[in-house]
Image (spheres, helix red, strand yellow):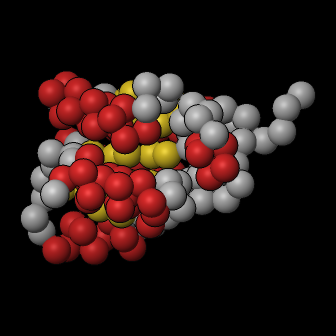
Amino acid sequence: MGSPRSGIGEEKTDEILLGTAVRIFLVEDNPEHAFIALTVMRQVLGDAIEVLHAQTTDEALEMITQFTEFDRPDLFFVDLRLPDNGGFAVLSAVRASEVCSTIPLFVITSSIYDRDIAESYALGASAVLSKPLSRGKLREELARIGALPRSSVNAEMTIRH
């Protein structure tokens, strides 16, 4: 059998730089927001990404319990404002999962409440990103956690001038 998949913040970084597909778990109930997020992710990470998409809290929670060290995602993106505060439940489940607890977790939200942002970080979010997701901010946060080289962020800033 193969070796276990690692989180992006560790040995996985070199694989991303070499063009290996990145496995992403997106939890988003709004189809338009999901489309925008996936488009931005492909623009930043390339077309070789593999996306798992859950549209409901229950679906996400079930999928999280099914992941193994061999098929777990490399990145989580969770809509904070799922119905019934479901985004917080998903954050808690990811961090409680032995298999997924160290995987970078990004919250995507339209919430402007400091309380929501603070609670996201308290539950283990790697970053809180505002909707609509932007290429520059995603690239910056991925570089910050070590998933992209910092030079890719600087290249984006240079191109914008």
Which residue lies most toward the right here? Answer: 1
Q: Residue at x 36, y 32 (%)?
A: 42
Q: Position of residue 149 (x, y in %)?
A: 51, 58
Q: Position of residue 69 (x, y in %)?
A: 72, 41
**Foreground residue, 1 or 9?**
9
Q: Quadrant of the C terminus?
A: bottom left
Q: Quadrant of the N terminus?
A: top right
Which residue lies most toward the left here? Answer: 112
Q: Position of residue 81 (x, y in %)?
A: 20, 48
- Image quadrant in which you'd find residue 137: bottom left
- Residue 84 appears in the picture as rendered: no
Q: Residue at x 24, y 68 (%)?
A: 117
**Foreground residue, 43 or 58?**
43
**Foreground residue, 43 or 109?**
43
Residue 27 located left or right of residue 72:
left
Residue 135 located left or right of residue 103:
left
Q: Position of residue 106 (x, y in %)?
A: 38, 54
Residue 60 located left or right of residue 55:
right
**Foreground residue, 9 or 4?**
9
- Residue 40 appears in the picture as rendered: yes
Q: Residue at x 59, y 35 (%)?
A: 19
Task: Look at the picture and state if 126 lies above or below 21.
Answer: below
Q: Residue at x 18, y 53 (%)?
A: 160
- Image quadrant in which you'd find residue 74: top right
The number of numbered badges drawn on the structure is 0
Residue 78 located left or right of residue 71:
left
